[in-house]
Image (cartoon, rainbow, N blue to C red):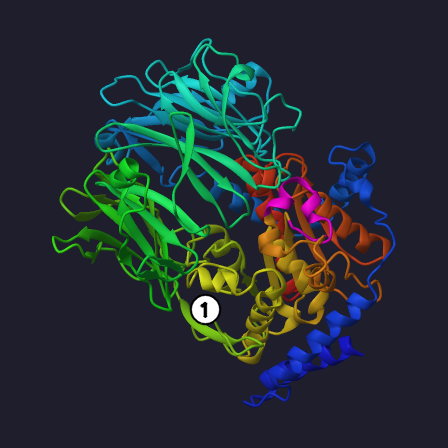
Amino acid sequence: MRFALITTAASVLVAACVTGTDEVAVTPETEAEAVVDLVEDMAAEAPTLEDPYLWMEEVEGERALAWVNAQNDRSLDAIKSHSLFDDNYAKALDLATSTDRIPYGRVRDGMVYNFWQDETNVRGLWRRTSLESYKTDDPEWETVLDFDQLAADEDKNWVFKGSNCFKPEGATKTLCFVALSDGGKDAVINREFDLESKSFVEGGFETLEAKQAVAWIDHDTVLIGTDWGGDGSTLTESGYPSSIRIWTRGQDLEDAIEVYVGDKSDVAVWPWASKLDDGTMIYGVQESDTFFTRTYYLLENGSATAFPLPKKASLGDDYQGWQFVTLQEDWAVGDQSFKTGDLVAFNLQQFLDTKELPPIDLVFRANERQAVNGVAVSKSAALLSINDNVASKVLRLEYAEDGSWTTKDVALPGAGQAGIVFADDEEETVFINYEGFLTPDSLLTYDAATDTTSGLKSLPTKFNADGLVVHQKEATSADGTKIPYFVVHREGITLDGSTPTLLYAYGGFQISMRPSYSGGIGQMWLERGGAYVLANIRGGGEFGPAWHQAGLKGNRQRIYDDFIAVGEDLVAICLTKPEQLGIMGGSIGGLLRGVMITQRPDLWNAVVIQVPLLDMLRYHKLLAGASWVDEYGDPDNPEERPFLEKTSPYQNFDASADYPTPFFVTSTKDDRVHPGHARKMAKLFEDADKPFLYYENIDGGHSAAANQKERAKRTALEFTYLYERLFPNDAAE
């Protein structure tokens, strides 16, 4: 009955669009009560027997992979048979392998280093050019490392996962750790690489495969956290390092000297190192006892000294003797008081000398519609990136003679999304990305010495934006909170509920969703008459830590209510109707989509569930899941388990319910979010004889794609599915 009630409510909203009335018969309170009742009923009917699909959690299990391959074949045949798939794939591949992309990079000793993938270089090239050449339209690139060639030479499925380079004060040689992943997994090996000779260092540092981190102390010494011995005994319950050791050149890895040990219950213990203005190196560890709480330690003379900071605080860069800290909780220290979201600073040298916390300066306090994203430090400037009503600003921080801090706007083209993509305390050049829904990416260069911004590179348009408009609107969530969202659609559309609409949001880990340019969405959705919606629901960082913390653990229904509220508002304003409303999201966004299937199956007709969490009673036992209990709640905690039981998509699947046909997308090589989540949920659909689609890429890690061709294929599959579900049957003709 309650399914019927909610369906009726959606029907009333659609009817309002058709008749043109401004009144909606169902109140938000009624809708909220219906959802609560529905969740409670589904929880009461949740299965109590042992999970019959645990065999699907065996990642490379023969039985599990046989099922995966069968579902892949079935689903690929179904989607690829659609008349638009080939066109979508051609568009996606052209976008993914296009050579007119901006080659983002970092500056090192007057050279710009860039990682580049295209149709020829599928795994990619690590390459470099001079800064002067980089500023031209056709830079002269020099290959540093060819990953396609490396994979072929070594017969390995290598995926480049980044580099960590170091050059001591006064030295001429730069050495790097190059991280290589098997198929895109988070676990990597690290190999020492010489930038000058463009070759791996014979007999140099090399690690075994693990989720790990390395910090340079000097050319012959590193601080490293890894899986010592490869048996997992030195890892945390979350699968990350708990033991930090000093490793000296020429020393066997197993002989490295242990300098810090965390607890098995920690999320992770990570090494860090920093070079001060005078060239002195300091180093230590970050012990993260939960995902959101941490303690920073300075290692010195065989002892560890804690930075006397609150547990919910992030130690940032240092600049001209000032150490920046961003607060995720209120902090009272002495007679000083600071608020959640504040950016503060203290004299680092004074702390190093005394091991006591110096007086704290308030550097920046965000208002209720702002949030601090972070501080980036160049040679002669510290730059603050903030959200301002979801749009972005970059501010230059200045320390005045009277001891106060001031800010100055860095010139940007407009009120879009701006992000600092490169800054280094040894370089004056700063790279800033700027884009919007309808504004292609631009790369700006900011000269910190002269305080000037100039355009460096910009993308050509990737889709026809003529006649498209962007609006920022608000929906009202179940508790009265105003939830902002952006809508992109054709100007002058008739608000009769007939527009195919794709709704996206994330909703977790304080990650902000901001306007961005997407050639794929533009070509495969907007150009065909669809509307795209980006919702800034709670759980994100759009308005600071409080916006995120409002949806933690048992309060997570607020996040779900926010998303539902936006979906209902899209129907209420007559932009679309449930039959033409689709949703898509991955990881924690995949969990959100799973919840939307079980809580509001009537509100959507297409659901793309990418690399999702779905079994919220076992997630903490799978791969990195234990690290996220502060976000989702602990199933083993009697006080926190009931909410998870009520909302976990896997446990609240109802074989008798009328669900939209979902499309599950995951990766066998995802060693962050276990593919078993998607497998088991899809199996429920199969055994209930309900339609679903499923695609599991063998490679790709948590991105579900390891190279540009796989990314193009995944994009084409998803947008073909969305089109088939949401556009009229004759729209492609």
- Describe the element under mark 1 as helix, strand or loop: strand
Which segment did they paint magenta?
612-627
In the visual, does 373 lie left or right of 97?
A: left
Residue 481 among magenta residues: no
In the visual, does 232 lie left or right of 423?
A: right
Residue 187 at x, y percent in the picture: 58, 31
Judge whether 337 appears above or below 74 on screen. Answer: below
- For image coordinates 32% across by 20% down, the residue present is 174
Q: Nearer the viewer, residue 706 or 557?
A: 557
- For image coordinates 36% across by 61% down, the residue present is 391
Task: Return the residue at label 1.
Answer: 490
In the visual, does 63 lie left or right of 464?
A: right
> Would you say residue 442 is visible in this rendering?
no
In the visual, does 632 lie left or right of 522?
A: right
Q: Nearer the viewer, residue 190 or 4?
A: 190
- Dot 1: within a 10 Å radius of its alpha carbon, few (fewer than 14), some, or many (20 or more) residues? some
Q: Nearer the viewer, residue 334 or 125?
A: 334
**Would you identify the image quadrant in which residue 183 lies?**
top right
